[in-house]
Image (spheres, coloured by chain):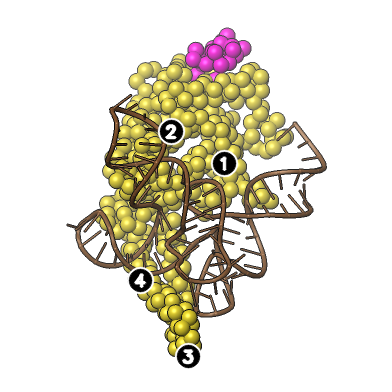
Chain colours: A yellow, B brown
RNA sequence: GGAUAGGUGGGUGAGUGGCUGAAACCACCGGUUUGCUAAACCGACGUACGGGGUAACCCGUACCGCGGGUUCGAAUCCCGCCCUAUCCGCCA
């Protein structure tokens, strides 16, 4: 969530940013309500502190008087303290109300987009940051979509997943399973080469962790929950990995902190059904290698570019046609300040599929998570967090299968050979 | 699942009602000494919120797992919850 301090000091910038997210004048009213509530909070804080200070002072006096045996005087002071106590109790309740109200309002405010984020309402308004200049793979008319290829070559089985679990839980098998594992291995190796520490986190997290990255309180419905133990299946590795630094104050020299993790991702998704979600296009469980960085505020946007280049390199190595989009204000995620999406061209479906999303959250996540760093002067400041998929598997697999199909079988990108142990699926 | 023990500052750990935001030691940081390193010595050393100051900083309040209670006053007493460790059982 945004810091009240920032809303106060840079109100105009925040308001402009929210407009870029197409906030109406009506919605923007919450900003003034936040500031007003915070004013009240501060005034109440002062009043409460004063009352407590006085009551502490009197209590000490009582102790001294008792020591001297002056019982009557002590009794008189006790009454005063009782009055103060009633007052401070009321003030405290009021404080709690104000804080809750403030939090509730802050939770509704999305991150303020970076100044370079374009205006816009829908995905059509996203800016193409880097287009695919070369021709798309030319496939014959009888080219198959990946779900047909999967049947033909026995790579994954969605019906079997229904039997075992339900819709949206693919069962990979044979060379399909092997390809999956090869990609994970490849992505992790590349991330480690780029200086990321490999993390293998738990796939279930508790409430505090889910709250830290903003899944709770309001996106609860996106996650699978284990009721009995009050744990959530992670929707992305970002959740456990970023939370590693929750409530920490790290020395500035440790920045940036770079971590990568492979995890399966579980998403309940309330989304649509139909042609666009066939096959692996949208599933409840998929594999993903995530890259995360905790960075100094002065360098976070440089780092965002570096992360984009990392993903770009992966796409190039896989020899897949892709483009990079700079998301417009209306299409960006709630917590993000700036997001680049990667889309891979799916030759048989003849459309772009999102395979990566790289974002800078500035201090939006770290504020909620209390992830801070201490600079050389000893000053404590919120760190910036960034993350990106590098990469999400299911759709990459779909693209590889479709784009690389030939009459002789599906050609595996060269860079994966050492991981798959085969060059072709036939 | 059963039985015990325990949760205090970055770590170890003292602290059973006021003089404890918290001893001591270790680590970290600054300094002295030193050819360098080490050792030794000196000093500083929690976080949040609020108030004051251009600022270094100063003042107030809260925080000893979390929440509530007793009391003029709670790390300390009482109640509830959560968590961790160890042993037993079960199990990859």
Q: Earlier in the sequence, mark 4 or mark 1?
A: 4
Q: Nearer the viewer, residue A58 or A126?
A: A58
Is label 4 or label 1 in front?
4
A325 with respect to A210 (left or right): left
Q: Chain of mark 3?
A: A
Q: Earlier in the sequence, mark 1 or mark 3?
A: 3
Identify the residue shown where x is 58% and y is 15%.
A420
Residues behind callouts 4 and 2 on a single chain: yes
Label 4 vs label 2: CA separation?
41 Å
Tag shown at residue A258: 2
Q: CA distance from mark 3 to mark 2?
A: 66 Å
Subunit bearing disc 1: A
- How far apart are labels 1 and 3 at the CA level? 63 Å
The dot on residue A72 is: 3
Q: Is residue A67 above or below residue A199?
A: below
Relative to A166, is A279 above or below?
A: above
In percent of the image, x 62 and y 36: which residue is there?
A: A168
Identify the magenta region.
A401-426
The vertical placement of A126 against A180, above or below, is below
Q: Are marks 1 and 2 in contact (CB under 8 Å)?
A: no
Residue A208 shows in this picture: yes
Q: Are discs 4 and 1 located on one and the same chain?
A: yes
- Determine which residue is flagged by label 4: A46
């Amino acid at each position: 969530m945004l810091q009240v301090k920032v809303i106060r000091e840079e109100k105009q910038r925040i308001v402009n940013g929210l407009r870029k997210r197409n906030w109406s004048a009506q919605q923007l009213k919450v900003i003034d309500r936040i500031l007003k509530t915070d004013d009240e909070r501060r005034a109440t804080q002062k009043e409460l502190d004063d009352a407590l200070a006085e009551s502490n002072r009197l209590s000490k006096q009582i102790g001294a008087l008792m020591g001297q045996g002056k019982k009557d005087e002590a009794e008189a002071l006790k009454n005063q303290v009782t009055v103060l106590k009633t007052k401070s109790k009321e003030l405290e309740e009021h404080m709690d109300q104000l804080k809750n109200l403030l939090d509730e309002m802050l939770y509704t405010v999305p991150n303020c987009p970076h100044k370079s984020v374009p205006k816009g309402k829908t995905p059509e308004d996203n800016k193409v940051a880097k287009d695919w200049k070369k021709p798309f793979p030319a496939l014959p008319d009888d080219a198959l979509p990946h779900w047909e290829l999967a049947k033909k070559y026995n790579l994954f089985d969605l019906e079997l997943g229904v039997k075992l679990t339900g819709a949206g839980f693919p069962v990979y098998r044979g060379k399909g399973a092997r390809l999956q594992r090869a990609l994970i291995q490849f992505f992790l190796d590349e991330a480690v080469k780029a200086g990321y520490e490999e993390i293998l986190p738990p796939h279930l997290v508790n409430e505090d962790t889910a709250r830290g990255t903003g899944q709770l309180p309001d996106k609860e419905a996106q996650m699978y929950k284990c009721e009995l133990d009050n744990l959530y299946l992670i929707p992305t590795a970002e959740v456990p990995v970023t939370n590693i630094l929750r409530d920490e104050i790290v020395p500035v020299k440790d920045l940036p902190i770079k971590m990568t993790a492979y995890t399966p991702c579980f998403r309940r998704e309330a989304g649509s059904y139909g042609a666009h979600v066939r096959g692996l296009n949208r599933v409840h469980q998929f594999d993903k290698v995530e890259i995360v960085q905790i960075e100094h505020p002065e360098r976070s946007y440089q780092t965002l570019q570096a992360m984009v280049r990392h993903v770009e390199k992966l796409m190039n190595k896989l020899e897949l046609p892709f483009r990079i989009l700079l998301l417009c204000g209306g299409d960006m995620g709630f917590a993000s300040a700036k997001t680049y999406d990667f889309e891979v061209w799916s030759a048989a479906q003849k459309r772009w599929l999102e395979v990566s999303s790289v974002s800078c959250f500035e201090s939006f996540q770290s504020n909620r998570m209390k992830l801070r760093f201490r600079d050389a002067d000893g000053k404590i400041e919120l760190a910036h967090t960034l993350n990106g998929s590098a990469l999400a598997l299911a759709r990459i697999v779909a693209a590889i299968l479709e784009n690389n199909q030939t009459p002789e079988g599906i050609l595996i990108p060269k860079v994966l050979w050492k991981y798959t142990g085969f060059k072709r699926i036939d």
